[in-house]
Amino acid sequence: MVSERADIAVIGAGAAGVMAAIAAGRAAMEAGAGLRIVALDGAKTLGAKVLVAGGGRCNVTHHHVDERAYAGSSRHSIRNVLGRFDVPRTIAFFREIGVELKQEDTGKLFPTTDRARTVLDALLSEARRVGVELWHPWRVASVRAFDGGFEVQREVAEACDEVRSLVARRVILATGGKALPKSGSDGQGYSIAKSLGHTMTPRIFPALVPLTTPEGHFLRELSGVSVPAEVIVRGAGAKAIASFTNSVLLTHFGLSGPAILDASRYLADARHADPQAALVLNFAPGSAPGDLDQTLVSAKGPGIARWLAESLVFHARVPGHTNRGLPERLSRALCEHAKVDPSAPVQSLTRAQRTAIVSAVTSLAVPITGDRGFTHAEVTAGGVPLAEVRLDAMESRATPGVHLCGEICDVDGRIGGFNFQWAWSSGHIAGSAAARSLIAGT
């Protein structure tokens, strides 16, 4: 069996893995140390998730990132990691490798080229510049710890003269989770982490994932409509567990769009504890039911559907949308759902009709049958708890010499660049620490 040696083996060359490899390479160069750093990935083409992110533009980060945008492990632990490589350092890093970022109205930061390829090419170029070897396709089957290092075993060796194993002094697990499996994220990293002494959270499930509604639900008939809305997850006793205001996209299968994706993991969590947990839509974001009712009492107009389409005012601003009026198809559908004639003059509505309209517009409970699974999810919820990791080095408490970063950890963020920021922050810490420990001889 053909085997080679390296100082650091990075398993997974996605966002977190490449950042870890770069950080390790930079630390070695600064110290004048000749460390051999090898990044291994099972994909034939690297960077699939980077290339599809942000609609092909790659939402690199967000202008303001803190622990409140994340779920999973404790917020204190997440804050600890984010603070060691924050947004200003991330922006500076990308500038150093030739990627200028611009901030949009949403707070998201994209490359000025509006091309994800710009980000990926710069990352891979920097990795090579600092001496990182990128081996792919090279899918890892197992990692075995022994005195003095780790044996990284390849899953398949097509030819006998190919390298079938790599012996490394340090290992960085950056395998990702299970989201978007066609990119290579199929959960294999969890098995490797378990073999090295780690546990997993009791549940590993899709996050930032579109939701499905029953066949025949009236919102399905409005496929293609995009509307600003407040999405509320309600638990027992109608208590609001989470709320997100952003665009909602009505689709042929159910619901999507930023606000829905953000709410999806909280709904899944809530339903695990209480199957009766509900998803509620407010199509007049920033407005309470009583506000709309009072407005309707004094409003006049040729028809309630037209009034909703032309005169309804929202008090919450959503980028990309005006704060007035519902799409005409939606306003008519909501009237029909409320069993109110869409052409009925506003001033002629009875109290019961007003109540029905207000409920449909501001408190529409939507039956959710499930989600579209890991195939359509942007990130994974669950993984290795941060309690099992030394946060100053992202190093395993179970097996020293193993570092973890990125999506394999029990951390998932909102849509908008937050998950990339976790990748950059945790990857930088893991790579830097792995290299410096070797340089220091520890």
Image: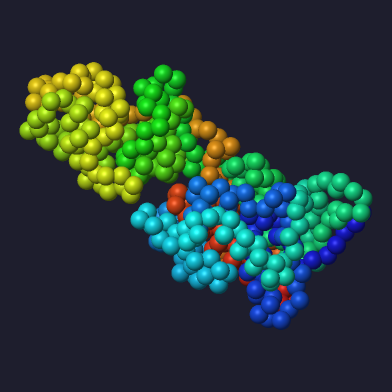
Where's residue 137, x and y in %?
76, 50
The residue sitting at 21% across, 32% down in the picture is: 308
Q: Is 90 positioned to the left or the right of 195 in the image?
A: left
Q: Which of 188 and 250 is in front in this view?
A: 250
Where's residue 55, x and y in %?
50, 47
Q: Is residue 431 above or below residue 210?
A: below
Evaluate whether residue 405 shows in this view. Answer: no
The residue sitting at 45% across, 59% down in the picture is: 109
**Quadrant of the frame with the N terminus:** bottom right
Where's residue 107, x and y in %?
38, 57
Q: Is residue 101 above or below residue 189?
A: below
**Quadrant of the frame with the C terminus:** bottom right
Q: Is residue 336 above or below residue 209?
A: above
Q: Nearer the viewer, residue 286 or 219?
A: 219
Q: Is 202 positioned to the left or the right of 137 in the image?
A: left
The residue sitting at 49% across, 66% down in the picture is: 100
